[in-house]
Amino acid sequence: RALVGAVREAALHTIENALVLDLLTDAEGRTAGVSLHVMGEGQHDGVGAVRAPSVVLATGGMGQVFSA
């Protein structure tokens, strides 16, 4: 809840219900974004890439990391 509140106050863009596939890096090897699979609806559904100066990975659970 603290993270959600801080993000709202800072007016940051979040993408929920997404699995990060890989971190994107720049020529110097610094993180520059992510490739991801969004399991949502509308314009945020599918596989794509997001470039960003900073990336925060926040997990809500480990349910889809390991096979059952």
Image (tube, grey):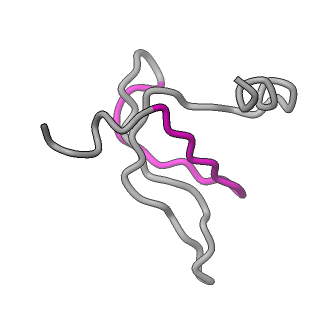
Q: Quadrant of residue 19?
A: top left
Query: Where is 15 relative to 57, above or below?
Result: above
Point out residue 42 in the picture as x, y percentages from the top left corner. 43, 16
Q: Residue at x 55, y 48 (%)?
A: 50
Position of 47 with respect to 26 (left or right) is: left
What's the magenta region?
Answer: 44-60
Q: Quadrant of the N terminus?
A: top right
Q: Quadrant of the C terminus?
A: top left
Q: Name, please, the residue furthest toward the bottom.
A: 28
Q: Residue at x 15, y 42 (%)?
A: 67
Position of 13 with respect to 47 (left or right) is: right
Query: Where is 22 relative to 68, above or below?
Result: below
Position of 68 with respect to 4 (left or right) is: left
Identify which residue, 66 or 11, lies in the foreground.
Answer: 66
Query: Where is 13 relative to 49, above or below?
Result: above
Q: Quadrant of residue 31?
A: bottom right
Q: Residue at x 70, y 55 (%)?
A: 54
Residue 23 included in the magenta stretch of the image: no
Identify which residue, 42 or 5, lies in the foreground.
Answer: 5
Identify which residue, 5 or 55, lies in the foreground.
Answer: 5
Query: Where is 21 relative to 29, above or below?
Result: above
Identify which residue, 14 or 2, lies in the foreground.
Answer: 2
Point out residue 33 in the picture as x, y percentages from the top left corner. 57, 56
Q: Quadrant of residue 65?
A: top left
Q: Name, please, the residue furthest toward the left.
A: 68
